[in-house]
Amino acid sequence: MALRLMPTASRSRTVPTLPSPAIEAACLPTLVAPRLQLRWMEADDLEDLYAVFSDPDVMRFWSHAAWPHRDEASIYLEAIQRGFEQGSLFQWGIALRGDNRVIGTVTLYAIDHAHGRAEIGFALARGHWGRRYAREALTVLLEHAFGTLGLRRIEADVDPRNQPSLRTLEAIGFRREGYLRQRWQVAGEMQDSVIMGLLASDWAAAH
């Protein structure tokens, strides 16, 4: 299961960022959910990252094709760490509590501190689908985003064929706000986008 994410310079927009007290630490804080922990990723996680992002099933509706080479994992991790330093991309590894191995990632990107908004993305290894881990990880991430980070709006870009991700987002309060035709071209295939949004006020009312 995956929801589109564009962390590389070639697929992301230029977004103005402002210094934030939430990013003065040396790394992302660990966020704890009932069965999961969202944590900072290091070089020791490269093999696990590669296992997730090299799987064509996981990447079916992503913004780029599955990784063909292992060295792409180290390039990706460098982009994650650079995005954190710039305050524009916060990407956590998803690990089971009691087992520190990364089984996926969940991300806030295109973070615009001036306007209080960001976009969200996630990917989960195929062997862990169907257990509502994505919903659990997104819930604790949104609590952090609307609470500690003080964001006002979170957006998601989902391929309309990606029904599991659409159901997951709607279950936690996201609303469908628009439909963009042929927004992406990935591996020669044209892909549409469903644009979804969640406001901090919606989240507070529901929780």
Image (cartoon, helix red, strand yellow):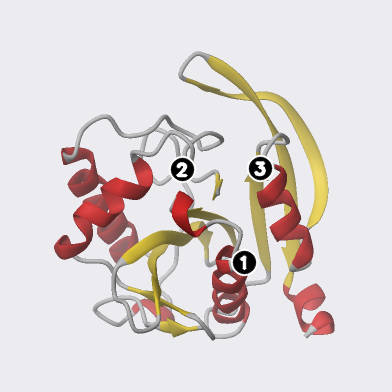
Residue 89 seen: no
Q: Residues within 10 Å of mark 2 (few under 14, many from 20)?
A: some
* Mark 1 / mark 3, whichever is N-terminal: 1
Task: Determine which of the numbered discs, if any, sits on residue 6 in the image.
Answer: 2
The residue nearer to you, when weighing 158 against 83, is 158
Q: Is residue 136 left or right of residue 46?
A: right
Per the image, the residue denoted by label 1 is 132
Per the image, the residue denoted by label 3 is 158
- Find out whether the residues at labels 3 and 2 contact each other: C-beta distance under 8 Å: no
Q: Amino acid at mark 3?
A: Val
Q: Is residue 168 above or below residue 3?
A: below
Q: Amino acid at mark 1?
A: Arg
Spatial CA span between label 1 and label 3: 18 Å
Q: Is residue 25 left or right of residue 172?
A: left
Q: x and y percent of residue 116 in the render? A: 61, 68
* Mark 1 / mark 2, whichever is N-terminal: 2
Q: Which mark lies nearer to you, 1 or 2?
A: 1
Which image quadrant: the C terminus?
A: bottom right
The residue at 55%/56% (across/down) is 129
Name the element at disc 1: loop
Q: Amino acid at mark 2?
A: Met
Q: Please, which residue is most extreme toward the top here?
A: 188
* Numbered marks: total: 3
The residue at 47%/60% (across/down) is 107
Residue 187 seen: yes
Q: Residues within 10 Å of mark 3 (few under 14, many from 20)?
A: many
Q: Residues within 10 Å of mark 1 (few under 14, many from 20)?
A: few
* Mark 3 / mark 2, whichever is N-terminal: 2
Name the element at disc 2: loop
Q: x and y percent of residue 143 in the render? A: 61, 81
